[in-house]
Amino acid sequence: ETYRIPKGEANEMITPAGVRINLIFNAAKIKNRKNLLLDEVIKKPGMTHPAFIIDGINELQSWLFAEGIEVTEGPKNLGSRRIALFIRDPDGNVLEFNQLLSEGKNHETI
């Protein structure tokens, strides 16, 4: 996190490569909102969701549970390279979190 906007309930993050991501925390929740790129029978082209690399998927899952944030999928192995966990923001957008694993080792799904 590089900048927090308390009144706007937002923050900005920047990667070492200069990629900036802004997150807004005070969005209104709309029940049963669908993601037009992922949730429809006919898929549309476009960016479906951002994916983040994290160090501890178990710690993230515990934090999400404590905050009352529903995990929509995972944690689960995606091949032998990573464990993924998915959530949805209030607008129905998917956020993916990945913990990278050592290549070639047999890991059980958490």
Image (cartoon, grey):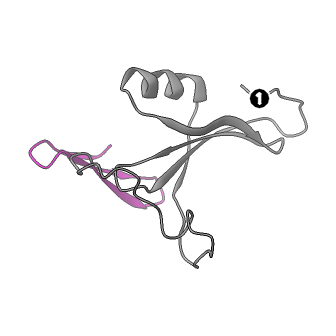
- Depicted 64 relative to depicted 9: above or below: above
Q: Quadrant of the C terminus?
A: top right
Q: Position of residue 17 (x, y in %)?
A: 48, 59
Q: Is residue 34 magenta?
A: no
Q: Which residue does the image show at 24% across and 51% down from the upper left?
A: 27
Towards the viewer: 100 or 29: 29
- Report the span colored magenta: 1-24
Q: Quadrant of residue 101?
A: top right
Q: Which residue does the image show at 45% across and 23% down from the upper left?
A: 65
Name the amino acid type tagged 1.
Thr
* Residue that protrudes farthest toward the bottom in the picture: 45
Towards the viewer: 34 or 23: 34
Q: Which residue does the image show at 29% across and 46% down from the upper left?
A: 2
* Residue that protrudes farthest toward the left in the picture: 7
Report whether 4 appears left or right of 69.
left
Q: Position of residue 48 (x, y in %)?
A: 54, 65
Q: Which residue does the image show at 13% across and 49% down from the upper left?
A: 8
Residue named by callout 1: 109
Q: Position of residue 68 (x, y in %)?
A: 38, 27
Local secondary structure at mark 1: loop
Q: Position of residue 10 (x, y in %)?
A: 22, 48
Q: Residues within 10 Å of mark 1 (few under 14, many from 20)?
A: few
Q: Is residue 11 in view?
A: yes
Towards the viewer: 8 or 1: 8
Report whether 107 appears left or right of 38.
right
Q: How many marks?
A: 1
Q: Quadrant of the N terminus?
A: top left
Q: Is residue 56 in view?
A: no
